[in-house]
Image (tube, helix red, strand yellow):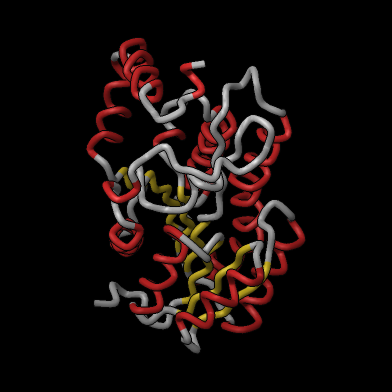
Amino acid sequence: MNQGFQNKTVLITGATSGIGKALTMAMLQAGARVAICARNSKNLQKVKEELMNEKLLTVQADVSLETDCKRFVEVAMAAFGSIDILINNAGISMRALFKDLDLNILRQSMDVNYWGTVYCTKYALPHILDTKGSIIGISSIAGYKGLPCRTGYSSSKFAIQGFLESLRIEMLEEGVNVMWVSPGFVASNIRNTALSADGSAQSETPLDESKLMSAEECANRILKAIAQRKRTLIMSTQGKLTVWMNKFFPGWVDRQVFNHFSNEADSPLKK
């Protein structure tokens, strides 16, 4: 079932692994024309060779750079002639106590997660207005509830949701749907590449990835939500409870979140 994506043009950032790659595969299977970008040209080439689909366009781009985001949109428009859906998926995580980290980690988190979303949305929006399409941001429960040892990540996700909510209201009478997605914990590479206090990659995930939702299942849920033009999508029961409980019992939720993250392997909170 293509869910209405046949011959639609979809732009996806950060699409060489995890949720982004799964979204790319799902959209291609649904008959969409898909343009993807990522910083690493070798990884892009691997995806291109693996998928071998004439409807797939790959563009090397660093979303933290405005010029790269503008070029990504321009190349997609030149190739496909229209843009129906933008999925702002590119993102980085981090794991360190604020008192210990280099402030460049927070800047990098904002540059990739927040500004990458803003830049791509800015240049894609005129074309999405023409098609009355959709703009999607892949956020996190960390955009609803600040998480310890993730100050940079949480602040960038709060910023994304504030930006997209404001944009949604601006677009109410323009026919453009704006949605953000909070997947919860999904099996992906994002925790392995999370930045530690000195800016180096964490390399190892603190979670048992085999017990998490698969990227493929996450992608399928996102496609369904886009087709239904939802406002938001919170996937996990834990995430829904966290958001709801935090409205009424924020102090209690603070303690539960602290305890949860204290129990992670090698948690910085234990130091």
x and y percentages locating residue 262 in the rendered image: 40, 21
Q: Is residue 156 above or below residue 130?
A: above
Q: Is residue 125 above or below residue 255?
A: below
Quadrant where the N terminus sits is bottom left
> Which residue is the extreme one toward the bottom?
54
Residue in the image at 58% along x and 69% along y: 43
Q: Is residue 104 or residue 30 the one in the foreground?
A: 104
Q: Is residue 61 or residue 93 the one in the foreground?
A: 93
Residue in the image at 52% along x and 16% along y: 271
Tally of numbered discs? 0
x and y percentages locating residue 166 in the rendered image: 52, 40
Q: Quadrant of residue 194?
A: top right
x and y percentages locating residue 2 in the rendered image: 29, 77
x and y percentages locating residue 229 in the rendered image: 34, 58
Q: Is residue 256 or residue 8 the one in the foreground?
A: 256
> Which residue is the extreme one toward the top?
251
Q: Is residue 191 above or below residue 268?
A: below
Query: As drawn, is 8 to the left or to the right of 109?
Result: left
Residue in the image at 26% along x and 34% along y: 238
Residue in the image at 30% along x and 35% along y: 239
> Which residue is the extreme one toward the right?
67
